[in-house]
Amino acid sequence: MSARTFCDRGLALARAGGRSAHPRLILAVTILASTLDYIDGSVVNVGLPAVGRDLHGDAAQLQWVVNAFLLPLSALLLFGGALGDRFGRRRLLTAGLGLFAAGSVACALAPSLSWLIAARAIQGLAAAMILPSSLAILGDSFQGAARSRAVGIWAATGSVGGALGPVLGGWLIDQVGWRAIFLINLPLAVGAIAIALYAIPAAPRTASPARLDLAGAALATATIAGLTWGLTEGAGPGGWTAPAIAAIVAGCLFAAAFLWVERRQGERAMTPLALFGSRPIVALNLLTLLLYGAVAAFMLLLPYLLITVVGYSATAAGAALLPFPLIVGGLSPVFGDLAGRIGARPLLITGGLLVASGLLLGLRASGGAYAADVLPAVAVAAAGMGCAAAPLTSAVLSSVGPDHTGAASGLNSAVAQLGGVIAVALIGGVLAAKGGAFVDAFRIAIVASAGACVAAAAAIAVLFRPTSTGRAM
């Protein structure tokens, strides 16, 4: 996904008043670390047609090239934050960067799609270690207005990276081959590790380290894996076979077990159950699931359409997405400030409806004329995400008390990733179609995604009623 999730457990849990002897270097580390995730995700979307041709992959396998990364990231994002608290954020960050580099090399050398999918899972696991640690380090290293400036620079730089990634990746695919898109991760990872070891102080050992919610993490992973596999198989060409239905049922049972375990863990839980009793938090997470899922489907299907049907090169398809992260990055600070004056609710509703409008404009994308058929859809959808992203962060953090900010923001980050997982799982039938049938399936998927955005806005209109203090818990 190209739309960055602004809610992050790391920032919410960062200690106020932190200082660092090397603040600029630490800012550089966090930018390099997070850029690995955002660039890698967007570049792979552009590279799927080339991967499918070279490794003879069908639609279901190409889905897993994307979801093998998103699944461990969404399932283990909260657990990654807890690991950083337990073992030290610098240690976990550098280990995650090293693992991401190793996974990238494995992707580049993949002799088969099965190998590539396994290597993408390694990258997703590494990203779950990197993201919460890097943002917590950023929050620890700055205070007051300096922290706000640092986060703004981080967000803006990430938007630029997300914009340039598909263009650079498309050029590499056209000129060198799809394997090169994974090798560009290596200098970023090596540079980030070197700077981190120099600039970030090692965390002191604590007498009583935090207890890890291993059972919760395992059950969350099993839940998402079962649901993802079942949805992928059921929505694909094979249809709703007995194994697909069994996987859905197993995922639901794992989800019930997860809730039971988290209830027993109480405040030590990875995701305290008190969050699920807050109507505003439920509304915000429902909006996040639907909105980010719809955008994930659009950002995967649009370049696939442009390359396989319209005839764009990979470079041109990557460039077609260029306005999206730039518009989101440019508008988010503006709407974040506006949310502080008028509240998040009207902006979240407007953002959802704008994204729906942009997706519906995408029904014209098969015409191929960029300025008339593609750019309006990308620009309007991006404006909607820019309207919603920063107010969503503000709403999540203001809807809970200080004891729950880390859990609430971490849950929202995980839900955003989960939206992408589910969306990619459901579009197998679209990717399996060819020619005119693909265009028809693309349009159905776009209309469904727009409907999800309208439902997201409706969830906020009906369920989100912040109190006078702005808090629900």
Image (cartoon, rainbow, N blue to C red):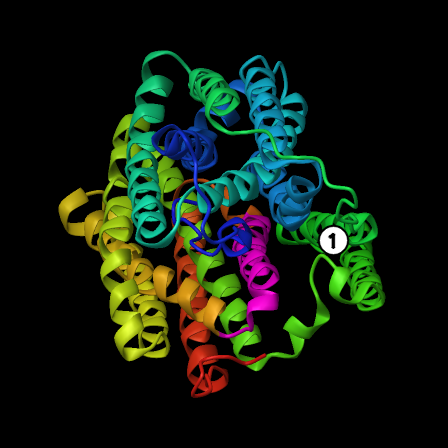
Q: Position of residue 208 (x, y in %)?
A: 79, 46
Residue 423 appears anywhere in the view: no
Tell me the quarter of the picture where residue 278 sits: bottom right
Q: Name the residue: 75% across, 60% down.
A: 269
Q: Position of residue 65 (x, y in %)?
A: 57, 33
Residue 389 relative to residue 85: left or right:
left
Q: Name the residue: 67% across, 45% down.
A: 76
Residue type (three-letter) at the residue carrying disc 1: Ala
The residues colored magenta run 399-427
Query: Where is 220 relative to 132, above or below?
Result: below
Question: Considering the image in quadrants, where does the C terminus appear?
Answer: bottom right
Q: Nearer the viewer, residue 395 or 229?
A: 395
User: Is residue 413 inside the magenta stretch?
Assistant: yes
Residue with the mark numbered 1: 220
Q: Name the residue: 15% across, 50% down.
A: 372
Question: Considering the image in quadrants, where does the N terminus appear?
Answer: top left
